[in-house]
Amino acid sequence: MRFLKLLFFILAMMVGAAFTVLNAEPVLFNYYFGSREFPLSVILIGTLGLGIFLGILSGLNTMLGLKRKNSILRRRSRLVDEEVKNLRSLPLKDQ
C-alpha cells in the first residue's frame, strides 16, 4: 500500500511538473484594485489551493459538530455499560 501511495505521489509530481512547463505563458490577472501578470500555472495552482482551503473551511463546522456528537455518544455508552455492570452484580430476589 505504501508503494502505491509513493508511486501515485511521484506520478502526480511528474504530471504537475509537465503542467507547469507547458503552461508558462503569462496571463493578465485582474483583481479588485488592479491587475498583474502571472504565469498561467501559478494562477491555476493558486485557485486550486484556494478551493481546497475553502472546502476544508466549509466542512470544518460539520466535522466539529460530528466530533462533539461522537464524544457525547461515547460518554452515554460508557454510562450505560457501567449501569449494566452494576445491574449484573446485583443478587436476584426470590419471589
Image (cartoon, rainbow, N blue to C red):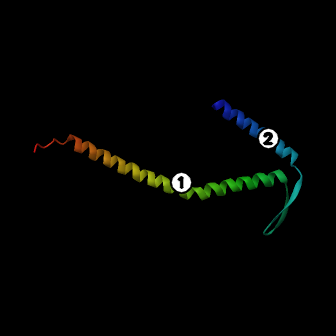
Q: Determine the secondary structure under disc 1.
A: helix
> In x, y percent, where is residue 47?
75, 56
Q: What amino acid is found at the position of numbered circle 2 in the picture?
A: Val
| Residue annotated with mark 1 | 63
Query: Closer to the camera, 39 or 63?
Result: 63
Image quadrant in which the N terminus is located: top right
User: Is 82 located above or below residue 56 in the figure?
Assistant: above
Residue occupying image coordinates x 40% and y 53%: 72
> In x, y percent, where is residue 6?
69, 33
Image quadrant in which the C terminus is located: top left
CA gap, disc 2 and disc 1: 32 Å
| Residue annotated with mark 2 | 15
Residue occupying image coordinates x 87% and y 45%: 22
> In x, y percent, where is residue 59?
59, 56
User: Is 72 located above or below residue 8 in the figure?
Assistant: below
Neighbor class of circle 1 (other Cα within 10 Å; few <14, some 14-19, many 20+) is few
Query: Closer to the camera, 59 or 33?
Result: 59
Circle count: 2
Q: What amino acid is found at the position of numbered circle 1 in the picture?
A: Met
Residue occupying image coordinates x 84% and y 65%: 35
Query: Closer to the camera, 85 or 14?
Result: 85
